[in-house]
């Protein structure tokens, strides 16, 4: 199972000093957090996409492209890629470029965001949010899987004989998650394509999360991609930890009370009771998150939000150290202890997807051969990856 962190990139004053970092300082701190996440053994770093203050992550591919050159193992992802207000042609090109630069060590999560004004800023109508998500993603898939595209739709100018460049690495597009917290249409879209579904449930009770995930699982099976329990699911979360649980509550409360997202609303205790926010000891975090599989089934990715609300960078690093050193190793073992052998333990890697596509004759051998020459991969490597994915994932992806 994959464990990682995501950032919403907020700029929030520290309640103790009243000081907020400027944009440059915040961007650089996010990059440092991503690198430290790899150092402590986490699997994923993800960034959101926002185009308004108090957020600074307006260009995910720029940030992740830089991190691709600074890291070696961690998967670089988005917590939101705005499928509704970005041109799908630019998305096809930018994320294929990131895929090439990172040697496949990336994926992305499509979403509609949580800022209504972003629609007119980019020339779109918020009332068309769902149709935009559906049409734009359908075009994006074609741009990745077809060399030459003729296309006409409702929301952008037609394409005639268009080829998106660069082509996806090894002829296999990036793995895609669809993120939604309230729209069953997006869960349906994820299930239709056999993609992953990410429910970033940081503001929602488990009863709602369970309902959304169950719906996606049922539709995943309906479309013939595998059993419902083999669908690829990710969840969000928020934690703040100290060795002594009361110390954690005392330290985090001023940040919670003044955060622009939920400050001056429900109490810390009420919010923690109704959402995944867990403020306490490492063991409390382990116990709570290990239990989530009993509500949503065995899932594949858990991302934590830990760098928000004005927390100092030093404190965020301490949280990463606790996650990587005390929490994730135990959670990883616990989550795998009762997972059925044919239920995926993580989303498919690029090597696994290439091996499956190659075995199914879905990629041109010369494309893979050229990439193998560049990366040093061999046919034996691909065969080993194919064996691994067959044993671990069974028929989960319907390939």
Image (cartoon, helix red, strand yellow):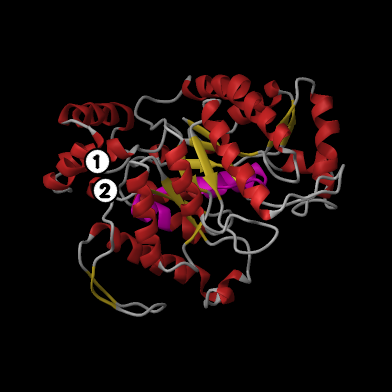
**Image position, residue 141 (x, y; %):** 32, 60
- Residue closest to the eye, 368 or 302: 368
| Other-residue count near label 1 (Cα within 10 Å), few / some / many at <14 / 14–19 / ≥20 | many
3D distance between C-alphas at marks 1 and 2: 6 Å
- Say which residue appears at 52% left-offset and 54% top-offset: 80
Vertical arrangement, residue 164 with respect to residue 3, above or below? below
Q: Quadrant of residue 235?
A: top right
**Image position, residue 239 (x, y; %):** 69, 35
Residue 303 in sight from this viewpoint: no
Which residues are the magenta region?
189-214
Residue 39 in sight from this viewpoint: yes
Vertical arrangement, residue 220 with respect to residue 340, above or below? below
**Image position, residue 356 (x, y; %):** 22, 39
- Say which residue appears at 54% left-offset and 59% top-offset: 183
Q: Quadrant of residue 269?
A: top right
Vertical arrangement, residue 283 with respect to residue 271, above or below? above
In this rendering, the count of numbered labels is: 2
**Image position, residue 128 (x, y; %):** 51, 74
Q: Secondary structure at mark 2?
A: loop
Q: Quadrant of the C terminus?
A: top left
> Horizontal placement of 104 versus 47: left or right?
left
The residue tagged 2 is: 172
Tag 1–tag 2 contact (CB < 8 Å): yes
| Other-residue count near label 2 (Cα within 10 Å), few / some / many at <14 / 14–19 / ≥20 | many
- Say which residue appears at 20% left-offset and 67% top-offset: 148
Is residue 213 rendered magenta in the image? Answer: yes
Residue 181, numbered label: none
- Residue closest to the eye, 396 or 327: 327
The residue tagged 1 is: 354
- Say which residue appears at 80% left-offset and 36% top-offset: 252
């Amino acid at each position: 199972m994959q464990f990682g962190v995501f950032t919403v990139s907020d700029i929030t004053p520290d309640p103790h000093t009243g000081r907020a970092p400027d944009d440059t300082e915040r961007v650089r701190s996010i990059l440092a957090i991503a690198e430290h996440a790899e150092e402590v053994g986490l699997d994923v770093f993800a960034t959101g996409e926002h185009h308004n203050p108090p957020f600074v992550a307006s260009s995910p591919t720029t940030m992740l492209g830089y991190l691709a050159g600074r890291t070696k193992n961690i998967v670089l992802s988005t917590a939101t890629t705005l499928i509704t207000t970005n041109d799908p042609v630019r998305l096809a090109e930018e994320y294929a470029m990131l895929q090439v630069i990172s040697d496949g060590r990336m994926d992305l999560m499509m979403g509609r965001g949580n800022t209504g004004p972003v629609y007119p800023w980019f020339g779109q109508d918020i009332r068309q949010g769902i149709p935009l998500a559906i049409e734009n993603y359908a075009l994006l898939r074609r741009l990745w899987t077809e060399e030459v595209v003729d296309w006409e739709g409702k929301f952008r100018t037609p394409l005639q004989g268009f080829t998106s460049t660069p082509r996806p690495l090894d002829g296999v597009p990036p793995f895609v998650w669809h993120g939604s917290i309230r729209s069953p249409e997006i869960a349906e879209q994820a299930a239709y394509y056999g993609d992953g579904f990410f429910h970033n449930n940081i503001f929602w009770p488990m009863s709602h999360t369970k309902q959304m995930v169950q719906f996606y699982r049922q539709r995943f099976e309906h479309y013939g991609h595998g059993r419902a329990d083999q669908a690829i699911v990710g969840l969000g979360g928020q934690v703040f930890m100290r060795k002594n649980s009361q110390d954690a509550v005392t330290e985090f409360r001023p940040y919670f009370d003044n955060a622009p997202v939920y400050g001056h609303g429900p109490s810390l205790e009420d919010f923690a009771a109704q959402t995944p926010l867990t403020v306490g000891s490492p063991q409390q975090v382990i116990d709570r998150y290990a239990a989530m599989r009993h509500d949503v089934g065995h899932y594949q990715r858990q991302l934590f939000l830990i760098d928000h609300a004005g927390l100092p960078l030093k404190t965020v690093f301490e949280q990463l150290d606790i996650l990587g050193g005390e929490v994730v190793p135990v959670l990883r073992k616990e989550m795998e202890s009762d997972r059925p052998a044919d239920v995926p333990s993580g989303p498919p890697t690029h090597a696994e997807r290439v091996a499956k596509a190659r075995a199914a004759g879905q990629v041109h051998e010369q494309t893979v051969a050229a990439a193998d020459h560049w990366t040093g991969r061999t046919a034996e490597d691909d065969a080993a990856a194919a064996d691994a994915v067959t044993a671990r994932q069974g028929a989960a992806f319907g390939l």
